Image (spheres, coloured by chain):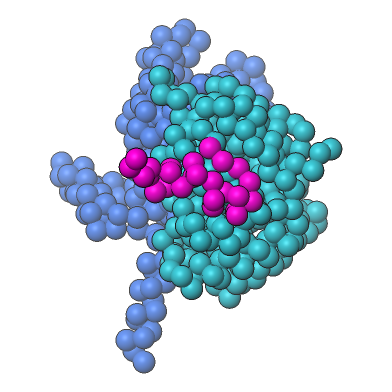
């Protein structure tokens, strides 16, 4: 027993940040899953995460707000921004929406880069390490629970209907614009909370962490894992967070292999790694083959 | 309130310089089956798009039970009690049949975000009622055995029936059917004819666009004929059948 706790202690001190990252990335992947499930290709989630991170860190550093209040504010701030920009931006669809939301992300990044209060390019230093493992576990569990409830309700069905055929959805009495705004805003809230959690275990944040590359990373997690249900995005987040660490021994070839894995998955599993229908069919074949 | 469910008065629709509909007027009475026929490109589907709010008329009035529909968003018009099916079927292919029909009930599930998150008794009861009603509607069109199937795997005829059930799920007073028998074989047509008669007998108003003359003549109480964007005849099937303008529109004019 002593041996176990000692070893766990070692493991935890080395890898706790990595485990935390998996949890936060899972929340981010779920936040983009939400907009994707409504048929919206929005790439604003990295910016929403950044807004959540900066707002929460500034409230902690300057006003000394309590951690729960800071987390809530970290979610509410980007949700409010999403609500504001949603009305004009969500008139767009497909790649045009992707471009507009990417542009929004750049606006946020450059604003943060040039403001004095955000520390400019140097970012914010010395954020207290308030985030503990159970905070992330609890908030991730709440997110999963909330999204699972949503999926099985009229809201989830409305999202799916909008994704499949917007005109038909409208004629079923669904207020399409309102539901798109709901998906966008809720996605912003989840990404913002993830950003606030992230800021409070990394000690330091800078504008570089919330740019184009991260927007694409978040999307990749969801797409790699598969977006047919909630498990896919989380699996994708875990793989994309852990893979670079597992490949550490490859040194310079690391990102090469990382990229190759992505290409292979997209080529051979276009609907993502976790696709319940394919996995069920595969199992049935296995059982059928043995009988 | 008049006995007319839907009243269309002097409606016009122009796309740029192109007059698709001009001075179109007719009334759809409650509790009947009304037909709109006409050659290809006469503007029939445009009439449906105007009624359901997908397009706005450039002239005229569209009233449903005395309320104007012009300028309302499509989901508000659905809320008032008009549902439609499409010429090129538009079911939700990645959902199962039950979910498809339950999407139609969207407006009638009145739980809020709070009830949804905490799975409140009211929310559970509403979902249960919706599921039962969806099963009932599926049984009306004979698809209850396939309720858990993916809609994409249905045959063409069954997809049309699913679209019926989904449209009825919005609890409409008037059902708009856009070419309900397009692409169907004679026996499927006969079954569908019965289906539409059943729907009418349940108290719904039915307004359909159709090409198949025998089908329309056998089913409709009244018919309007549209040609080049204008109504050229209106009346009972017998009146329309013998109208010289209609014969000319469909068969061409005899050489003098």
Q: Where does residue B151 sit, x and y in percent of width and height?
A: 48, 62
In the rendered view, tell whether residue A43 sits above or below residue A267.
above
Magenta stretch encompasses residue B233:
yes
Q: Where does residue A59 sit, x and y in percent of width and height?
A: 60, 20
Occupied quadrant, residue A274: bottom left
Query: Which residue is located at x 34 percent, y 40 percent?
Result: B256
User: Between B255 and B110, which is closer to the camera in this rendering?
Assistant: B255
Residue at x 80% of width, y 56% of height: B121
The residue shown at (21%, 42%) is A255
User: Given the current orientation, which residue lies at the most extreme bottom position?
Assistant: A291
Q: Which chain is cyan?
A: B
Residue B7 falls in image quadrant: top right
Residue B108 seen in render: no
Q: Going by the picture, which residue comes out furthest to the right?
A: B1
In the drawing, does residue B215 fall left or right of residue A216?
Answer: right
Drawn side of residue B178 relative to residue A155, left or right: left
Q: What span is colored magenta in the figure?
A: B232-256
In reply to whether residue A107 is colored magenta, the answer given is no
Using the image, determine if residue B176 lies above or below residue B7: below
Q: Nearer the viewer, residue A33 or B55?
A: B55
Q: Where does the N terminus of chain B fall, quadrant-wise?
A: top right
Give the side of residue A251 with respect to residue B155, left or right: left
Which chain is painted in blue?
A
List x then y, in percent, for residue A54.
Answer: 51, 22
């Amino acid at each position: 027993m002593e041996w176990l706790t000692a070893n766990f202690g070692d493991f935890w001190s080395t890898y706790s940040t990595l485990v935390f990252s998996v949890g936060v990335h899972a929340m981010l992947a779920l936040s983009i899953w939400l907009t994707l499930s409504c048929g919206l290709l929005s790439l604003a989630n990295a910016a929403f995460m950044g807004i959540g991170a900066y707002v929460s860190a500034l409230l902690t550093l300057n006003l000394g707000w309590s951690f729960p209040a800071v987390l809530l504010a970290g979610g509410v701030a980007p949700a409010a921004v999403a609500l504001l920009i949603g009305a004009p931006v969500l008139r767009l669809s497909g790649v045009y929406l992707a471009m507009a939301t990417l542009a929004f992300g750049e606006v946020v990044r450059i604003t943060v880069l040039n403001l004095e209060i955000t520390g400019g390019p140097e970012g914010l230093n010395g954020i207290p390490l308030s985030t503990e493992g159970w905070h992330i576990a609890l908030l991730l569990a709440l997110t999963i629970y909330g999204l699972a409830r949503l999926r099985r309700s009229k809201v989830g069905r409305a999202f799916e209907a909008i994704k499949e055929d917007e005109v038909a959805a409208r004629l079923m009495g669904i207020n399409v614009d309102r539901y798109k705004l709901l998906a966008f805003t809720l996605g912003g809230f989840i990404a913002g909370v993830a950003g606030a959690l992230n800021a409070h275990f990394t000690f330091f944040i800078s504008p570089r962490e919330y740019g184009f590359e991260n927007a694409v990373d978040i999307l990749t997690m969801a797409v790699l894992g598969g977006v047919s249900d909630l498990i896919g995005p989380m699996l994708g987040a875990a793989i994309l967070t852990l893979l670079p660490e597992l490949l550490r021994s490859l040194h310079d070839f690391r990102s090469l292999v990382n990229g190759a894995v992505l290409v292979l998955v997209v080529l051979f599993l276009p609907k993502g790694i976790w696709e319940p229908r394919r996995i069920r069919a595969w199992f049935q074949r296995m059982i059928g083959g043995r009988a | 309130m008049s006995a007319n469910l839907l009243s269309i008065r002097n409606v016009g629709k122009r796309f740029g310089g192109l007059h698709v509909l001009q001075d179109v007027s007719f009334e759809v009475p409650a509790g009947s089956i009304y037909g709109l026929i006409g050659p290809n490109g006469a503007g029939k589907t445009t009439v449906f798009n105007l009624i359901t709010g997908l397009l706005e008329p450039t002239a005229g009035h569209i009233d449903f039970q005395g309320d104007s529909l012009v300028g309302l968003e499509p989901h508000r018009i659905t809320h008032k009690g008009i549902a439609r099916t499409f010429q090129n079927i538009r079911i939700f292919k990645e959902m199962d049949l039950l979910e498809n029909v339950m999407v139609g009930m969207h407006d009638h599930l009145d739980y809020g975000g709070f009830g949804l998150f905490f799975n409140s008794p009211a929310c559970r009861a509403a979902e249960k009622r919706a599921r039962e009603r969806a099963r009932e509607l599926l049984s009306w069109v004979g698809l209850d055995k396939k309720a858990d199937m993916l809609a994409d795997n249905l045959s063409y005829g069954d997809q049309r029936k699913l679209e019926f059930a989904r449209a009825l799920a919005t609890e409409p007073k008037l059902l708009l059917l856009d070419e309900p028998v397009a692409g169907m074989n004679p026996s499927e047509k006969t079954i569908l004819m019965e289906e539409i008669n059943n729907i009418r007998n349940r108290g719904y108003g039915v307004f359909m666009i159709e090409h198949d003359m025998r089908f329309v003549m056998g089913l409709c109480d009244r018919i309007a004929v549209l040609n080049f964007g204008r109504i050229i005849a209106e009346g009972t099937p017998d009146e329309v059948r013998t109208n010289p303008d209609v014969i000319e529109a469909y068969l061409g004019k005899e050489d003098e």
